[in-house]
Image: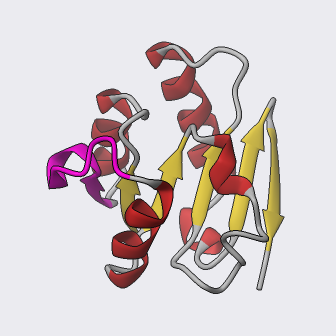
C-alpha cells in the first residue's frame, strides 16, 4: 500500500510500515512541513497514498468526504508519544489490512477502528 505520513507521525512508524512492505512517503520528506490540511491531502490523493496523521481535523468527513481522496487514517490517541504511536500502528497492522482503508476516512482509537466508506 502507498502511504504518506503527516509531519506529526514519528519516524519509527515509517520504518515499521516500510519493513511491512508498504511504500512510505512523508510530508516532511517532501518539504511540506507546516502546510495547510488541503495542501497535504491533495498531493497524497494525487499520488494514491493513504494519509496517516494525528491531526483530528482531518477526520471531518464533511471537509474530506470518503472517496474524494486515497484515504485518511487519523490516530486519535490520548498519548501521542513516539512509543505510543508506534504501538498503536503495530496493533492496527496486526488486526487490519491498510488497503481496506483506501478512499475512507478512518479513526483509530483505543483498539477500535471506525471506518467511513464512500
Identity of the residue drawn at 63% across and 54% down: 58
- Is residue 31 covered in magenta? yes
- Above or below 29: residue 70: below
Residue 25 rendering spot, x and y as whole percentages = 25, 56
Question: Who is closer to the viewer here, 1 or 115?
Answer: 115
Q: How many marks?
A: 0
State the residue at coordinates (49%, 56%): 37
Q: Position of residue 106 (x, y in %)?
A: 72, 58
Which quadrant holds the N terminus? Answer: bottom left
Residue 116 locus on image (x, y percent):
81, 70
Tell me the colour scheme of the image. secondary structure
Q: Is residue 12 magenta?
A: no
- The answer to which image quadrant residue 114 occupies is bottom right
Instruction: Residue 3 in the image: state x and y as whole percent.
Output: 39, 61
Instruction: Work out whether 94 lies above or below 86.
Output: below
Image: 83 above or below 20: above
Q: Residue at the location (67% across, 48% down)?
A: 57
Q: Which image quarter is the C terminus in?
A: bottom right
> Residue, x 57% and y 17% (percent of image)?
84
In magenta, the rendered stretch is: 23-35
Closer to the camera, 105 or 16?
105
Q: Is residue 4 left or right of residue 116?
A: left
Amino acid at each position: 500500500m502507498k502511504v504518506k505520513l503527516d509531519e506529526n507521525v514519528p519516524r519509527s512508524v515509517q520504518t515499521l510500515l516500510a519493513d511491512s512492505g508498504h511504500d512510505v512517503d512523508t510530508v516532511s520528506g517532501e518539504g511540506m512541513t507546516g502546510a495547510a490540511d488541503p495542501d497535504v491531502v491533495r498531493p497524497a490523493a494525487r499520488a494514491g497514498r493513504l494519509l496517516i496523521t494525528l491531526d483530528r481535523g482531518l477526520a471531518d468527513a464533511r471537509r474530506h468526504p470518503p472517496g474524494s481522496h486515497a484515504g485518511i487514517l487519523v490516530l486519535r490517541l490520548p498519548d501521542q508519544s513516539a512509543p505510543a504511536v508506534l504501538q498503536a500502528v503495530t496493533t492496527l497492522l496486526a488486526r487490519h489490512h491498510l488497503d481496506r482503508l483506501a478512499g475512507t476516512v478512518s479513526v483509530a482509537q483505543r483498539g477500535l477502528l471506525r471506518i467511513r466508506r464512500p
